[in-house]
Each structure stands twice: as C-alpha cells, then as structure tokens.
Image: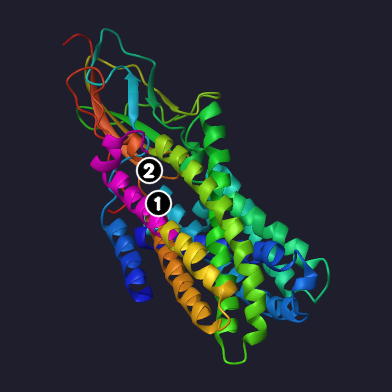
Amino acid sequence: MRRVMITLAFGAAALGAAAGAQAHAFLDHASPAVGGSVPTAPAVVTLWFTQDLEPVFSNVTVTNEAGQRVDLGNTRIPPGSPAELQIGLKPLPPGAYLISWHVVSVDTHPTEGTFTFEVGGG
Amino acid sequence: MAELLIVSRLLQFASVIVVFGCGAFRLYGLGVDPTSISANAPTTFDAWFWRLTTVGAVVVLVSALSLTLGVTANMAGSAAAAFDPDTIRKVLFATSFGRAWCWHLVFAVLAIGVCLAPRARWRMPAILVLSLLLLVSLGWVGHAVEGRGATRLVHQINQTVHLLAAGLWLGGLLPLAWLLGLARSPSGTAWISLARDVVPRFSQMGYAAVAFLSATGVLNTLLLVGSTQALVGTPYGRLLGLKILLFLAMVTVALFNRFRLLPRLRWEAQASAPVAALARSVLFEQGLGFAILAVVSVLGTWPPAIHVGVHRSGGADLVIAHHPVDR
C-alpha cells in the first residue's frame, strides 16, 4: 500500500512538472490602452498588473515599427504602487508601437506579454 | 527546473514537518505525566529524536538552498541564472521572497547548530522554538503573500494555522509509528503500556488538528480557487480536489484507529494484535500524508485558479500573458 501511495505521489509530482503553463501576474490595464490610439505622443507608458511586482526582475520596452527602442530605459515601479510598471518615452512621431513587458510577481513567477498602441489617429 | 522546485519543496515540507511534529510529540505525548511513563522511555525517545532531528535539519537546509536555486532560475527565466552569484544575491536580498527566505535559512542553520551542540538542558526548548519558526516561516512565502491589505493578513494567519496543524498531525505520525514499532517487537511488552497512554493523547491532538486543518483548508480554497466551478474546471482546482480527497481518506483512517483499534489496544489482554494493526494503519496514514505533501509541492508552483484567465483590455488586441520559464 505504501509503495502505491509513493508511486501516486511521484506521479502527481511528474504531472505537475509537465503541466502548469499559466500566468500569475496578468496585465490588468495600461495607459496608453491596449490596442488603443492616442492623439499625441505620451511621455510615459504605465502598466497595471494583478499582482505586486518584484522591481529587480520586472522590465518593459517600447519599440517602433522598425524594431528600434523608443523608450528611455528607465523602467520603474512607482513608490506606493507595487503593482504598477512605468517607463519614460522619447518624443514619438505618429505610428504604431509595440510594448513588450516581462515581470516577476511577488510569488516569484514570471510572466510576459506584448501589445500595441498607435500615436496620432492614423 | 520545475522538477527541482517541486522535489525541493517536497523535501522541505517533509523535513520541517518531521522536525516540528517530533518535537511537539515529545511535549504532548511523553512529557505530560512522568509517573505513568516507564523510566527510560524519554531517554530512548530522546536518543532517537536527536538522530532524526539532526538528519531532518540538514535536509531542511539543503532543500531550502536548492529551493533558492530553483526560485532564482524561475525568476530570472533561465536555468543558468541559478548559478550566477549576482542573480542569487538579487533574489535573496532584493525581493520580498528572498527577504523572508533569508530568515528561514538562518533558522535552518541555527537548528543544525543546536543538534550538533553538546548535550544540555537548553537544547530541547531551543529546537522546539526553531522548528516552530521554520514551520511558520514557510507561510511567509508563496501564495499566501500574494494579496493586499486585510486579505493578505487573513490569508497569512490562516496559512500559518494550517501549517501548524499539518505539522502537528503529519509530523506526529512518525514518532507514533516509532513507538508502535517498539511495542510490536518481541521485547516490546514494556512499550505496550506506554502506547496505551500515548495513543489517546495523539488522538486528542488529532481532533484539534483535523478541526483546524478543515477550517483553514476551506478558507484557503475560497481564497485560492473561489468557486466550485473553478474547483472542478481548472487543473489547479482538480489537483486541490485530490488533496482534499487524500485528507478525507486520512481522517477516515484516523477515525478507524481511534474508534476501532484504540479500544482493542486498551481492553484486549493480548495487545500484540491490535498493536500490529495500529502500526500498519499508521504506516498507511503516513503514506497518505506523504502523498498530500507531494500534491502540495506541485500546487504551489501553479497559479491559483482564482487568477487564471485571459484578459481583453480595451480595444481589439488580445493580451495573453504566458509563462516563459520552460524555454
């Protein structure tokens, strides 16, 4: 019986190792909005997440249609808002931009995602 | 790396629970009424206890360290990161996980120190306190610290009580099995009268433990799963369901021990048969308990079902957050 139990236990462990491909900290909303369009170039991009983040392992980049970085590289978590991620932007001409974020929540799990926004009604 | 995390968690839980449960057993099982206990029982137990606790404390430290490596790899997104001193330093000192885990590592080192110290009266209270701290500090990391404000505080307190109850019950099964093993041996008749005293005390502790485990388990399920739909409809929920089933099986075995086997042990003149039956039953219970720990080891690496979902945030783009670790 004990051997059966131990086999079951390791079976459960193996099952766990194979599966478990879902996220912990989801992007809740963003500014500029996901897939949205803004009339003028924003100075910062702000992302709000469903979990508090670990500053040391969380970052975000913004690139233009040519794949060049258009952010200032100054990813930060505002003091007092541990579930927010911000990054400053260079002045942006009209066009489509891609935001790529990679964060680790306080429960140690990393998540990442991307979305686009547009500047200038286009 | 996921496998390293799961195995490390399992060894961590098992060793902390064993160290805590054995120490607690010494208090409620053996230490209560010295006159009813044979003179050399505490000494024999202590010899076994310190051997077991020394091994247990070493396993606690080693698995806590390998857990640190696993978490580092997870957070940094690559297995190689687990061996980079800079990244490990970042995890241990610049994350909320690490700041809590440092304490846990300190407690583990101190516990080994106590085990290796020369015999002295302060050793037993010291190891009891350290094993309590080790168990409690397990609740300072993980899913219980995810939320905010009042929810987080409630969840943490709930998780701490859950761990203590589990530590008492699961951890107590090992010394109980040890005692029954002695009572079962050919020269063990002196131990049978001790068993007749200690088993009811273990049962009393068991009632309280089961009550607290059930209550805190229900609250944990509400906080981490949130609905019956999620309980049956998500992998996390279903695995938690397996844990609940295993728990119910353990309770059933415990009730069988208490109401069928214990009376036989008390009243039958020829105690060897009920002692043997109890010993087998407790062994089975331990197997179930180990299976629960294995399930919990996996569960802690999955996102709680209450968080699972795909977000559609304003506009046409679908935002899917995915787990990049197993690249």
x and y percent of residue A88 in the render? 41, 22
Q: Quick check: B222 left or right of A113?
A: right
x and y percent of residue B209 in the render? 56, 52
Residue displayed at 56% across by 57% down: B206
Pointer 1 residue: B74
Q: Quick check: A77 left or right of B60?
A: left
Q: Over which residues does the magenta segment extend?
A: B225-250
Evaluate whether residue A68 shows in this view: yes
Foreground pick, A16 / B216: B216
Pointer 2 residue: A110
Residue displayed at 45% across by 66% down: B285
x and y percent of residue B88 in the render? 52, 54
Residue A66 tag number: none
Residue B201 to residue B229: above or below: below
Residue A115 to residue B187: above or below: above
x and y percent of residue B73 in the render? 41, 55
- Mark 1 lies on a secondary structure that is helix
B227 in magenta: yes
Q: Residues within 10 Å of mark 1 (few under 14, many from 20)?
A: many
Residue displayed at 34% across by 35% down: B307
Pinpoint the chain carrying mark 1.
B
- Amino acid at pointer 2: Pro
Pinpoint the chain carrying mark 2.
A
Foreground pick, B278 / B80: B278
